[in-house]
Image (spheres, grey):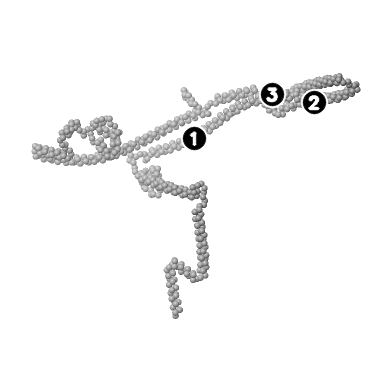
Amino acid sequence: MSCGNEFVETLKKIGYPKSDNLNGEDFDWLFETVENKPFLEWFCRNVNEQHVLTEKELQAFSTLQKSGQPILEEQALDEVLKTCKTSDLKTSTLEGIELEKLETELQALQKLKNLKIQRRNKFQLIASANSHRSLQLNAKEEEVTKNLKESQGFLNAVNTKITNQLQDLIDGVGKLTSFFGCSETKQGTTPPPPVFLSQLALEKYLSQEGQSTVALTLYTKKHFFPGIQELVESSNEENFQLFDIQTPSICDDDANESHEERRLEMARLQLAYVCAQHQLIQLKANKCSLQSCIKWAEENLQTLASKAIGKEDLEAKISSFSSEILKLEEQIAQLNNKTLPAVVKENAQLLNMPVVKGDFDLQLAKQDYYTSRQELVLNQLIKQKASFELLQLAYEIELRKHRDTHRQLESLTQELSQSNSVLHQRLEMLADPSISQQTHPRNTIDTKDCSTHRLYQLLEGEDKKQELFRTYEGLEEVAQKLKQNVSSVRDQLAIAAQEHSLFLSKLNNGVDMLYDTLYRGGNQLWLSDQELKEQFHQVDSHLKKLNHLLMDILSNVKAKRRILATDKLCQMERELYVYFFKDKEYLKNIVEKLEHQLKITTIGLED
């Protein structure tokens, strides 16, 4: 029960009006404050209906207040009660012995009262401690119940999720088994629709293909005769030529008869054409001769009628005309015997061109008809072959997919078996009584708990000495230290990131300044600067001066070295300078020795 509900129940006990309409959850916020919580808890535990005044007592108190008489409170009321007790004792008609007995009883009762007061105080302290402990336990119980509810909710959610996933897995496995399972179905149940191409029945398709094949063979037998292939293959350019009637054709035995008949027919046609042309030419020649004779006779008659010709002239003309006639008759005979038969023969040979052309046109039409029918048959055969190849390709693709799924299912079964074995090992490990939950939790880590020891070792490090007993408190301390180290490292990383950002900003500023100096606010690069040129020239001149100075110093040093190599006095002077700068005591001793020698030499000279 919550604190608000206890407060409402207490109000109901003391008879507070409209307490039934109150909701305990609305008063939970009062117990959250530290100041109100102890008083409200005391109120809920100690106050009852005996602490409530009746209506008569309230009316008497109200009449007393209305009367205006003073009302005694606290210390004044205690003093009045004491005076009332003393007056009652004085006015009592008891005897002295009874008074002594009463005094002794009063003392005993006072002692008993003091003892009970002490006990009450002790019990109050114990009760307050117990109440405080109970409050702490209630708070812990609320936290534990809250955590338990959260963990139960989380576990329920995880459980429902796992159950849903398992149900989906079961449904998927059921569908998969129905796909790959046998085709036997129970009585009264409709078989499931086919999913794979291999489950489809191909009898109808094969029967249709067989019917189409039979119809195609009948069609080919109906529209094609047995020798069509040889005829089509023999229809090349060599056969589309004129053949000579006199020369026998070199062909096969089957084609000789038809060719012979055609040759004889063409020979008869040519002979009839030659005779007809000969007669026609003779008739045309006779006609032309008659027309020319008539024309000549008419012309001569006109000339005879107009002029009188002599007999001698007439005989001369007749003789000339007769000689011309003889020449013409010779030419005509030559034409009839030589030229005309050759020309007629050539024309007769050209006569068979339309016949041969018509025959070949008929053969071409037949060939086109047979090729169109062949194309129809070929298209049908290509469609049939394409359908067979497509079906074969679909079967191969489905077979490859089945192999892939089989391989995946095998790997899945292996993984499931491995996970199942790992799960059994974990269950066996959890079933171990040493790992099971104990009634009294131990502070030290069990030696069999390898994972916790390994975690402790990882957190502690390998440099420290191994302790005899490792405790969970030590593990918590090590984890706390690791947490502090991680926070410090994060702070250092943040500081380093800030420094890095500052360095990058400075670097960017330097790059911008360099860009401004090199480009001077434009897009053209300035590789030379007047100030820099002047400074470089100054540096170059200084370097040249320094070089000259160095060369002078080197020449001076070389000259001094030559002098030192030849002059011993300069060598001694140099050694004295060296001693002066490095060893002054040694120089002092040398000077004293020289002075002493000088004194000796001066004394010797004086003597």
Toward the right, the furthest residue is 312
Residue lying at 22% horizontally and 41% vertically, measured from the top left: 122
Residue type (three-letter) at the residue carrying disc 3: Leu
Q: Name the residue under label 2.
A: 342
Height in image: 451 above or below 603? Answer: above
Using a 10 Å C-alpha cutoff, classify the residue at mark 2 as few (fewer than 14 neighbours), some (14 to 19) or many (20 or more). Answer: few
Is residue 286 in sight in this rendering? no
* Comes first in the chain, label 1 or label 2: 2
Rate crowding at label 1 as few (under 14), some (14 to 19) or many (20 or more) other CA atoms within 10 Å: few
Q: How crowded is mark 3: few (under 14 residues within 10 Å), some or many (20 or more)?
A: few
Tell which of 503 and 267 is nearer to you. Answer: 503
Answer with left or right where residue 575 lies relative to residue 243: left
Quarter of the image holding residue 428? top left
Q: What residue type is labelled 2?
A: Ala
User: Secondary structure under badge 3?
Assistant: helix
Residue 475 placement, left or right of 72: right
Q: What element carries label 2?
A: helix
Q: Is 145 situated above or below 577?
A: above
Pick the residue in front: 480 or 15.
15
- x and y percentages locating residue 141 in the rendered image: 31, 37
- Image point 15% across, 33% down: which residue? 67
> For mark 1, what is the residue?
408
Residue 194 coordinates in the image, percent (x, y): 50, 27
In three-dimensional space, the C-alpha distance between marks 3 and 1, rounded to whole angstroms, equals: 68 Å
The answer to whether residue 408 is seen in the rendering is: yes
Q: Toward the viewer: 347 or 316?
A: 316
Q: Check residue 362 in the rendering and tell me which mark sits there, or answer none.
A: 3
Looking at the picture, how far across and down is residue 449, in whole percent? 38, 42
Q: Nearer the viewer, residue 187 or 540?
A: 540
